[in-house]
Image (spheres, rainbow, N blue to C red):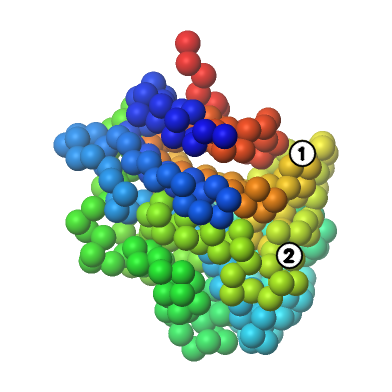
């Protein structure tokens, strides 16, 4: 099978789709096959992207965080069905139902919490934990605080010890590093107008990972091999915990219509059980950073792509199709507009 780089002319694709820049890694049979860098870090000055350019991983952060959580479970510091309130009881105040939210609920997005609190969406449980899927970054931040209590370390220190150092992810951090200032991608809106990059001073387990495609590929190789996890835990990571029966991401309302999405959720990864694939997407900075990762344990293959433009998700199906060709239900469920030439 040809490499994804030969199937898709990435430079032409991002130009046609009005995506300023892209960094992508492809793993085949467990080995890194290609690294692709195309486009510009900033459309105003034209500085090109290269393989060392730092991108927002956005919600691809969650899968990396989940990997550290599962290692702590293997080591006995955490239990999958432990209520978070045992260690951090005050994260969701005045909500008795929140006391039953567990680590499993957070990683499978069945906590009942909103994605992010807002004036019109206060932080509380909107349904009984475990009842159904509704995507929640708040749950991950709560679990982050639990991990910081248990380990007595900031979460970025924990991630460095359990993930970045052992996997040799030398250009990755959940907080901004001064070394990143030399080479990072700026965000762009739909009209390719660049803006200043947000540089996270504090870690957010759900969204603040700064990394490169090469570093994230090292993580994906660990996912494919089950490295640093017990065999049972590695399998559970990618086993369905909940079937998604509604075509929505944040699904807090009780009366939403149900449908067969062909998507499930594991412990930090979205799943396509029919195809044996796992995936996650990222969407940060008002949609101006887009990211996507997908892999297949059976094929021992995976892809990750980072973009610094509002239209970035529109080209992800074309990129994935070069490695894992199929009409993937994950893209239908995410429901982003897809770029089609002509």
Badges 2 and 1: C-beta atoms under 8 Å apart?
no
Query: Quick check: can you spot residue 99?
Result: no
Query: Quick check: can you spot residue 303?
Result: yes
Circle nearer the viewer, 2 or 1: 2
Name the residue carrying label 2: 235
Instruction: Answer few, some or many: residues within 10 Å of disc 2's Cα (few below 14, many 20 plus, some between 14 and 19).
Output: few
Name the residue carrying label 1: 261
Expressed as whole percent of the image width and height from the top left, the position of residue 52 reads: 29, 53
Q: Residue at x 45, y 30 (%)?
A: 6
Q: Nearer the viewer, residue 123 or 88?
A: 88
Q: Residue at x 71, y 72 (%)?
A: 231
Expressed as whole percent of the image width and height from the top left, the position of residue 285 reads: 40, 47
In this rendering, would 132 be left or right of 60? right
Q: CA distance from mark 2 to mark 1?
A: 22 Å
- For mark 2, give the secondary structure: helix
- For mark 1, give the secondary structure: loop
Expressed as whole percent of the image width and height from the top left, the position of residue 75 reads: 64, 85
């Amino acid at each position: 099978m040809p490499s994804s780089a030969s199937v898709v002319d990435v430079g032409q694709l991002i130009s046609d789709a009005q995506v300023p820049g892209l960094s992508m890694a492809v793993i085949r049979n467990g080995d890194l096959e290609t690294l692709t860098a195309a486009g510009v870090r900033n459309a105003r000055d034209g500085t090109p992207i290269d393989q060392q350019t730092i991108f927002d991983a956005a919600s691809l952060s969650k899968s990396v965080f989940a990997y550290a959580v599962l290692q702590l479970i293997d080591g006995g510091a955490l239990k999958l069905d432990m209520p978070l309130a045992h260690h951090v009881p005050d994260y969701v105040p005045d909500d008795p139902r929140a006391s039953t939210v567990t680590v499993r609920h957070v990683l499978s997005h069945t906590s009942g919490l909103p994605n992010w609190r807002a004036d019109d969406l206060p932080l509380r449980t909107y349904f009984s934990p475990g009842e159904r899927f509704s995507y929640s970054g708040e749950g991950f931040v709560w679990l982050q605080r639990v991990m910081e209590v248990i380990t007595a370390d900031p979460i970025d220190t924990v991630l460095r010890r359990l993930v970045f150092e052992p996997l040799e992810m030398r250009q990755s951090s959940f907080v901004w590093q001064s070394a990143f200032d030399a080479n990072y991608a700026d965000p762009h809106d739909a009209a390719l107008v660049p803006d200043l990059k947000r540089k996270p001073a504090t870690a957010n387990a759900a969204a603040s990972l700064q990394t490169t495609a090469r570093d994230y590929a090292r993580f994906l190789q660990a996912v494919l091999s089950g490295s640093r996890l017990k065999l049972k835990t590695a399998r559970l990571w990618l086993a369905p915990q909940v079937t998604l029966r509604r075509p929505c991401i944040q699904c807090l309302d009780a009366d939403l219509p149900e449908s067969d999405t062909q998507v499930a959720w594991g412990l930090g990864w979205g799943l396509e059980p029919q195809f044996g694939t796992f995936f996650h997407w990222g969407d940060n900075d008002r949609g101006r950073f887009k990211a996507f990762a997908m892999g297949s344990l059976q094929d021992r293959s995976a892809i990750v792509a980072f973009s610094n433009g509002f239209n970035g998700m529109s080209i992800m199906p074309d990129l994935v199709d070069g490695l894992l060709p199929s009409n993937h239900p994950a893209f239908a469920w995410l429901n982003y507009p897809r770029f089609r030439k002509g």
